[in-house]
Image (cartoon, rainbow, N blue to C red):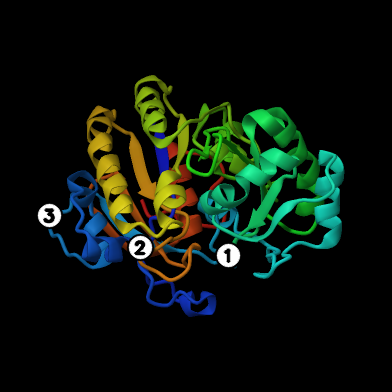
Amino acid sequence: MSRAFLIVLDSVGCGGAPDAADFGDEGSNTLLHIHERVGLKMPNLMRLGLGQTIGLPDASAEGLHGVAREISLGKDTPSGHWELSGVPVPWDWHYFPDKTPSFPPEISAEVAKFSGTDGILGDCHASGTAIIQRLGAEHMRTGKPICYTSADSVFQIAAHEESFGLERLQQLCQHMAPILHAMNVGRVIARPFVGTDAASFLRTKNRHDYAMEVPSPTLLDWAKADGRATYGIGKIGDIFSGRGLDENRKGFDDVLMGHLSDLVDEASDGALVFANFVEFDSLYGHRRDPEGYAAHLEWFDQAIGPILDKLRDGDLMLFTADHGNDPTWVGTEHTREQVPVVAAGVGAKDIGQIMFVDVAASVADHLGLSERGPGRSFL
């Protein structure tokens, strides 16, 4: 049986969302603006047709290529991934206001009560790395958790792995998750860090997302129900609360690339592998670093080349994104964009403009699954 590898390059949008103005993002275009600012050398994905998605015609493109639009009312990780897996978000997320304090007093009080402290730090919109540098020393001195949010539907808690304790941070997030999910806050995120001062504070790989439960079966569940092996790579297990997965492999992006390579070698016939590479977003998009973003795109393209060469006859490897995060844009938040869809293993084809749910339907079609969801296959 055929295998499928669905790979999300987190935040690698390609502009053009028809409702971008509603989000203050009209004119944003992550890929195109990086290319214009820095120049991109990505021969493997360009060969498949990536350039076509940002208006760089290439009649020699060898892969399937097009762009996908989202209907969920957000520009965040759960909305994008759920809809790519066949489940548009059926509600409006709750967002915390961009003011200080950002959080309802009862939420802050509950965090402090569980932590055994007389308050919290932060209570605002912030960049994760910046707020750790600013408040990390005070956190270590007082034990108060650092709580912050963004334009996304998230409640993030940063704490020192040693002085506060990683297990204690995870228990705090587990405690707060159902309270915040009841408010339609999409994710509670544990953000552990290490170091001794602002110059040395560094977030670790032990981040954990406590996401709201997906409201209906996804592509992963469809595959699982048909007896297929299912693998997550990166934060897929967190985004889907472990549902529909036999196994999830985690790490930084370089480690994740090794996991992907291993699964191309090891995954059984009929398997589904769903991967997220997050560092485009977390290290470069939010930090508005187009040069770093370009370098990471080129690293990814170089690393994926040998993996593409190992695909078996009948394999589908599809690359897409969950939203944009234009590093040349104002602010530090995600940008509402359509996303590229390029694929190897199914021949050369221009699929034009599709919807996110069509990705799930097409992967299900390729795998011959019983369920296809609300989308239409472009294969």
Position of residue 115 relative to residue 348, above or below, is above
- Image position, residue 49 (x, y; %): 23, 54
Give the residue drawn at x 52%, y 30%: 230
Identify the secondary structure beneath mark 2: helix
Left/right placement of residue 335 relative to residue 378 reads: right
- Image position, residue 200 (x, y; %): 49, 38
Among all residues in the image, which is located at the extreme top? Answer: 266
Note whether residue 222 is visible.
yes
Q: CA distance from mark 3 to mark 1?
A: 35 Å
Q: Earlier in the sequence, mark 1 or mark 2?
A: 2
The three-letter code of the residue at mark 3 reads: Ser
- Image position, residue 139 (x, y; %): 68, 43
Would you identify the image quadrant in which residue 218 lies? Answer: top right
Left/right placement of residue 187 relative to residue 284 reads: right
Identify the secondary structure beneath mark 1: loop
Q: Earlier in the sequence, mark 3 or mark 2?
A: 2
Which residue position holds label 1?
74
Give the residue drawn at x 47%, y 49%: 282
Which residue position holds label 2?
30
The three-letter code of the residue at mark 2 reads: Thr
Identify the secondary structure beneath mark 3: loop
Among all residues in the image, which is located at the extreme bottom? Answer: 21
Mark whose residue sits in front, 1 or 2: 2
Give the residue drawn at x 31%, y 45%: 296
Which residue position holds label 3?
60
Disc marking residue 273: none
Q: Label 3 crowding class (10 Å Cα cut-off): few <14, some 14-19, many 20+?
A: few
Q: Which is nearer the eye, 139 or 158?
A: 139
Mark whose residue sits in front, 3 or 2: 2
Q: Quadrant of the N terminus?
A: top left
